[in-house]
Amino acid sequence: MSFWQVAFLRAALFWLVATGALGVWVSFNPGMAALVRATHAHMGLIGFFLAMVMGVAFWMLPRPGGIRQTGFEGITFLLLQTGLVMRVVGEPWWRSGGGDLPYVLFVVSGILVLAAMLTFAIAMSRRVVTMKVIHEKGLGRRRPVAQQRQGAVRDATAADAAAGTASEAERESAPGAAGTGGENKGGSTDG
């Protein structure tokens, strides 16, 4: 897993715990429920669920030709997390009558989260391709089965030929070989 994939999953776990903690806090302060209800939902849905989906998708979805998208991963992560933090700070502040600054934080947070979603969609669109496209563009990491078999046979034949080129004298002069007076270092004796 890449740095950013791990970051997505760790952030998702952070938001899961934070969502639960906020829920417990609201149970002790029921008068605050209306103020943080939407924020609580965003922490769970965007912070936990969406970050988990994105992190696992970057990790597990096929990467034709082995492409790496660390740039997309990093940008998506930073946009999503920055947007979410701005929402968690700005939305309750704005709902409690905080004025223009919290409203700006609230609006910008939505724009950042949307930008993260668009970046993620672009990255995934490059991964979601048919096998036909992979073969046509030569993106697959594996050779077709017939070529793999031919390559394996060719490799085995070459290895056998290389092993057979050592002369009897070279084999006998090797340390530990029978009849050379060398010590058997393998710990076993021929019997």
Image: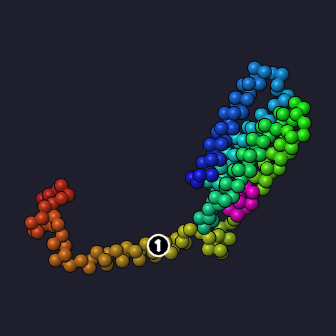
Q: In which quarter of the image is the C terminus?
A: bottom left
**Amino acid carrying mark 1 in the image:** Arg
Q: In this view, does 72 lie above or below 103?
A: below
The image's colouring method is rainbow
| Residue 185 image-quadrant placement | bottom left
Q: Circle 1 sits in a helix, a strand or a loop, which is it? A: helix
Report whether residue 69 is seen. yes
Bin the neighbour count of mark 1 within 10 Å (Cα to Cα): few under 14, some 14-19, many 20 and up: few
- Percent coordinates x, y for residue 171 in the rendering: 19, 73
Q: Residue at x 70, y 30 (%)?
A: 20
Q: In this view, does 29 lie to the left or right of 141?
A: right
| Name of the residue lying farthest toward the top | 28
Report whether residue 50 is seen. no
Residue nearest the viewer, comparing 121 with 149: 121
- Percent coordinates x, y for residue 70 in the rendering: 64, 58
Q: Is residue 57 above or below residue 144?
A: above
Q: Is residue 159 left or right of residue 54?
A: left
140 in the magenta segment: no
Q: Which residue is drawn at 88% across and 34% down?
A: 98
- Percent coordinates x, y for residue 61 in the rendering: 64, 56
- Percent coordinates x, y for residue 104 in the rendering: 86, 44
The stretch of residues the image draws in magenta is 119-127
Q: Which residue is drawn at 81% across and 45% down?
A: 109
**Residue where numbered disc 1 is placed:** 149
Q: Is residue 168 left or right of residue 19?
A: left
| Residue 13 image-quadrant placement | top right
* Count of numbered circles in the view: 1
